[in-house]
Amino acid sequence: MQKLSSIAKNLSRNILHHHHYHQLHSRVPGASKPPCDVFINHRGIDTKRTIAGLLYDHLSRLGIKPFLDSKNMKPGDRLYEKIDSAIEECKLGVAVFSPRYCDSYFCLHELSLIMETKKRVIPIFYDVKPSQLRVKNNGSCPPHELQRFEDALEEAKYTVGLTFDSHKGDWSEFLTTATSAIVKNLIELEGERARKNRKNFVQKL
């Protein structure tokens, strides 16, 4: 855990200037709030009180800015506007798949938007196997939406992720492993962003 904290602190230093810039500008009337680092896509009824909520707390304590609907939204917020904006601005998506995940239109919509905006995604298969995840057609969803959901789900299922059995697994060990994977991916993404900025700067010279 000490090594993880050190890595997280280095990451925080790397992105601090980015957050500080947004914090300064957020004081200007009409300016937008700083974007989140990690969007946690989950089925609240399955995971809000367990893995999703605990992961949110772990990341927050390390200085990383996660988005979880139950933590970041307040009465009066427009649901789609707030969530879609968080996904578009985030650096990394974490999709927590659970037994009833595919029953939720909102979960599948969020996952589809994460994939369509080309975000890097870490899947977490929580008490469910990838082969058990299927989009269900209850007759209320248009064909183009069903196809959109199926494409996003298939892409996520074939992305290397993490698995956890809540009945047999070690919660502390898993949360440390998941947090470490998220931190390492954020560091890689921050490095890619820095290289891209340097390249753009050189091209302008």
Image: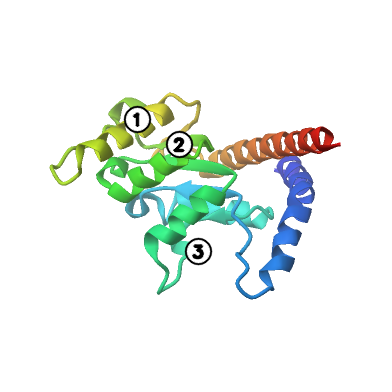
Residue at the outermost right position: 205
Viewer-closest of 183 and 153: 153
Residue 129 in sight from this viewpoint: no
Q: Position of residue 29 (x, y in %)?
A: 64, 75
Where residue 166 sits, quadrant-wise, is top left
Q: Position of residue 152 (x, y in %)?
A: 38, 33
Using the numbered discs, state the Cα–Cα distance from disc 3 to disc 2 in whole angstroms: 22 Å
Where residue 111 sits, quadrant-wise, is top left
Label 1: few (<14), some or many (≥20) within 10 Å? Answer: some
Viewer-closest of 202 and 17: 202
Q: Which residue is mark 2?
A: 115
Name the secondary structure under disc 2. helix
Select label 3 or label 2 by which is in front. Answer: 2
* Residue 72, disc: 3
Label 3: few (<14), some or many (≥20) within 10 Å? Answer: few
Amino acid found under the numbered disc labelled 2: Met
Which image quarter holds the C terminus?
A: top right
Label 1 close to label 2 by CB (< 8 Å): yes
Which label's residue is closer to the chain start, 3 or 1?
A: 3
Residue drawn at x 47%, y 50% is 52
